[in-house]
Amino acid sequence: DAGITQSPRHKVTETGTPVTLRCHQTENHRYMYWYRQDPGHGLRLIHYSYGVKDTDKGEVSDGYSVSRSKTEDFLLTLESATSSQTSVYFCAISRGAGELFFGEGSRLTVL
Amino acid sequence: GEDVEQSLFLSVREGDSSVINCTYTDSSSTYLYWYKQEPGAGLQLLTYIFSNMDMKQDQRLTVLLNKKDKHLSLRIADTQTGDSAIYFCAESIEGGGADGLTFGKGTHLIIQP
């Protein structure tokens, strides 16, 4: 299902470098989300968006920023990556009635 | 605050029924969900239930909700090797709108031959 794509799918970077992950949807949904998944923590919400230029913080937003200049794109930026941000990042869109449709994930390793 | 709890592992024999349990704390939860994650993939919605329902059945899946005890369970009948995955319980007040979903840590379902 190509309704949502994430890029890059894998990235290795060094501490202190900026990183941007991109989420692209083709379904024109209003709500988009960024989650991170870590062993022992499940999925935790980083930021979400409820429209173009409308974003808000989630549970674990420190060290992350987001932007949504177009309906179809939701960007997650790590201004200065740290090792604690090594994780798998999932983008999701809301299709209504709580059906979050997830991308395939972006695995980020910060050395 | 919202909190969703699940056991981390469940091991069952192929052909038996699997029952995955979940408890939640927010009594104002409107929707409760079960998601499945296969290795290397994103989460996939399996089923969901409205808080005014007690049970929902969909083929091999049965969801039971005890709102008084804030307990949700997922029963998978005739468990197959393809059911091996991580199962996440999740809750929402607004149906996945502004607040997104709050997920449990996930239950690893292990199938024994």
Image (cartoon, coloured by chain):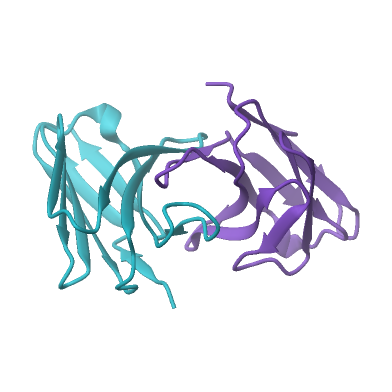
Seen in the picture, residue B30 relative to B82 is either above or below; the reply is below
Residue at 33% over, 55% down:
B31
The hue in which chain A appears in the rendered picture of the protein: purple
The hue in which chain B appears in the rendered picture of the protein: cyan
Residue at 71% over, 33% down:
A72
User: Which of B17/A68 is in front?
Assistant: A68
- Would residue A1 appear left or right of A108 to someone viewing this image? left
Position in image of residue B1 (x %, y %): 44, 78
Position in image of residue B25 (x %, y %): 32, 74
Residue at 73% over, 69% down:
A62
Position in image of residue B17 (x %, y %): 10, 41
Confirm whether residue A13 shows in the render: no
User: Which of B85/A48 is in front?
Assistant: A48
Seen in the picture, residue A104 relative to A87 is either above or below; the reply is above
Seen in the picture, residue A53 relative to A64 is either above or below; the reply is above
Q: Residue furthest bottom?
A: B1
User: Which of B36/B91 is in front?
Assistant: B91
- Would residue B102 appear left or right of A76 to someone viewing this image? left
Number of marks drawn: 0
Q: Residue furthest right?
A: A17
Position in image of residue B99 (x %, y %): 52, 61
- Would residue B17 appear left or right of A46 to someone viewing this image? left
Confirm whether residue A89 shows in the render: yes
Picture quadrant where residue B21 is located: bottom left
The C terminus of chain A: image quadrant: bottom right
- Would residue B76 appear left or right of A106 to someone viewing this image? left
Picture quadrant where residue B84 is located: top left
Seen in the picture, residue B29 relative to B85 is either above or below; the reply is below
Q: Residue furthest top?
A: A1
User: Which of A93/A14 is in front?
Assistant: A93
Residue at 68% over, 62% down:
A56
